[in-house]
Image: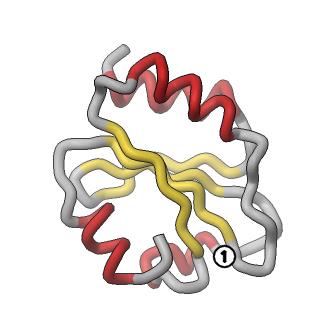
């Protein structure tokens, strides 16, 4: 997600699905360490309503509070509201939140 308009369409105005957002900052390289975990979850539960995104915290006003040290932040949204967030690459915690929200 590279603009406020895309943020509104994809996250705020898309009800019914779990949206997982990897929040990054343009001056720091996006975190790739967690991609395999997300791919496995998608392949195991791809029939569930969920979407994965990356978003630049410096261009999305709703993410300004996430700007900080070089540490990835993963935010979880449903029906336009943030329901959880995790700082750092913590695969067990990320998996736990996704499974809880998907009801598995």
Give whichever of 3, 91 is nearer the camera. Answer: 3
Quarter residue 58 falls in: bottom right
Give whichever of 55, 46 is nearer the camera. Answer: 46
Tally the marks: 1
The residue sitting at 38% across, 48% down in the picture is: 19
In this picture the colour scheme is secondary structure
Residue 41 drawn at (x, y percent): 52, 25
Secondary structure at numbered mark 1: loop
Residue 22 position (above or below residue 45): below
In-image side of 101 versus 32 (left or right): left
Residue 63 position (above or below residue 75): below
Badge 1 local density, few (<14 within 10 Å), some, or many (20+)? some
Residue 53 drawn at (x, y percent): 48, 55
The residue sitting at 64% across, 29% down in the picture is: 37
Quarter residue 72 falls in: bottom right
Residue 83 position (above or below residue 37): below
The residue sitting at 80% across, 66% down in the picture is: 29
Q: Dot 1 corresponds to which residue? A: 67
In-image side of 5 versus 55 (left or right): left
Residue 59 drawn at (x, y percent): 53, 85
In-image side of 39 versus 82 (left or right): right
Residue 31 drawn at (x, y percent): 75, 54
Q: Quadrant of the C terminus?
A: top left
The residue sitting at 46% across, 30% down in the picture is: 98
């Amino acid at each position: 997600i590279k603009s406020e308009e895309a943020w509104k369409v994809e996250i705020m105005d898309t009800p019914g699905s779990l949206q997982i957002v990897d929040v990054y900052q343009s001056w720091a390289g996006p975190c790739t360490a967690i991609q395999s975990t997300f791919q496995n979850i998608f392949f195991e539960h791809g029939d569930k309503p969920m979407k994965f995104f990356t978003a630049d915290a410096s261009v999305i006003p709703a993410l300004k509070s996430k700007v900080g040290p070089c540490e990835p932040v993963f935010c979880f949204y449903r029906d336009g509201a943030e329901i959880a967030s995790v700082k750092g690459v913590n695969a067990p915690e990320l998996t736990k939140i996704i499974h809880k929200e998907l009801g598995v």
